[in-house]
Image (cartoon, helix red, strand yellow):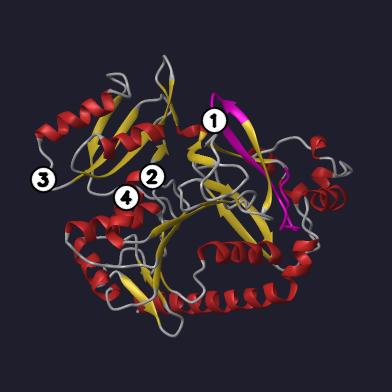
Amino acid sequence: MDDIKFIIRFYFKKYIDFFTRRLFCLIISLFWGNWIQNTSLENTLSYCSGKIKFYRNKGNDISKYRFIDKRDVKGSHLDFINNGYKIKHKGSTAGTSGTPFSFLRDLRCMVAEQHFQNLYFGWKNKYRVVFRGERIFRSGYKPHKIYMCIPFIKEMYISSYHISDAGLEMAVKKLSRIKNKCLWAYPSTAYILAQYCIKNNKDIHFDFVATSSEMLFDWQIEAIEKAFKCQVKDWYGQAERVAALYRCPNGNYHEVPNYSHIEFCKYNGSLFEIAGTQYHNRIMPLVRYNTHDLVEFNETECPCGNKGINIKVIHGRIGDFIHTGTDTKTATGLYCAFFKDARRINGAQICIDKDNKIVVKIVREECFNEEDEQLLIKTIGSHLPEGMFRIQYVSCLERNPSGKLNYVVHK
């Protein structure tokens, strides 16, 4: 009975989400033109200076505002809020560091996010297959099939909490009968589905694969495009809604116009931190909010014709760096090496404790042998000193409560 109630609630929530999106589309058609005309950094700063206690009387010169981050917002949470708004949505994020953080979004902020993603993904008339950590089934329930289709609204949800070859086989059979579809997934879940299809010679086509919320790696793109014969569209954003970047067909990332004001703060060498000022949230606006996400620029002009900032890679956060004692390495480099230089690896995760000791969790393929293990040790040893790491073989990798795979976990 509890399982049936959970499923009914899931269906109900998805229908509410669907009609909410339709309402947002109506709001966009009625008000977006006026909103976008009044969108500017100057207007945002004037509003914050007059309405938000934390920014009181700072004016519309951005140099008068200091950079802030999650610690500032947590420490003075109420000072960032305009309590005059009745329609609001409470969001939260644990982030890479695992530090909990809650914030408020107003109606315009929620509508704007949908508007910009709709423009980039172009999925208005697509059958949307969602593989992003949705809790379709009650915790502990073992379903016969790992997916659920929502009648009348062209959506299918696949559970990332019940992944198995048998479950994926049933999902793929269903997918083969669906036309005009796109996949909305985490990079890690899209890769799992792609690898299954490649390994089992399953021919599945999507019009495109849309990803976000995790780092997207070249080896993931290669597998996804090979399996599904389509383009990967990746969206970089964060729950705080202070910056958005999109991946163009040439593999570079560009700013989403009119989304926010983005600044890039020098961190180290060729790396820059992303800081942003919101344009579309009046209930809890954030100015010069440092995400601590790191990017590296491409100095050449992008072939797509975009004349703005050209980013070649998003490295992740400062916490995703490994200090070896003699130098500092990106965890990204080590993580990519598992799939470039090692063999027969289905998944990997880097766990760093407070003493900077590292446990590398590995999901092996069935044919993984001693020779593969020696190559794996050699691969990790080329990045980390001996004695700094140990390998732990696991059947699955740890995901956060949202179902996302954090490739670096801090214990």
Of the two numbered discs 4 and 3 on the same chain, state the one appearing first in sequence. Answer: 4
For badge 1, the amino acid type reads: Leu
Q: Which residue is mark 4?
A: 222
State the SS at label 1. strand
Q: Is residue 150 above or below residue 339?
A: below
**Residue 63's spot in the image, x, y percent?**
80, 35
Q: Is residue 152 above or below residue 128?
A: below
Q: Is residue 281 magenta?
A: yes
Q: Nearer the viewer, residue 397 or 183?
A: 183
Q: Quadrant of the C terminus?
A: top left
Q: Which residue is mark 3?
A: 367
Q: Which residue is mark 1?
A: 271
| Residue shown at the point (52%, 50%) measured from the top left | 304
For badge 2, the amino acid type reads: Phe
Badge nearest the viewer, 4 or 3? 4
Dots 3, 1 in contact, CB < 8 A? no
Q: Is residue 156 magenta?
A: no
**Residue 185's spot in the image, x, y percent?**
41, 60
The answer to which quarter of the image holds residue 83 is bottom right
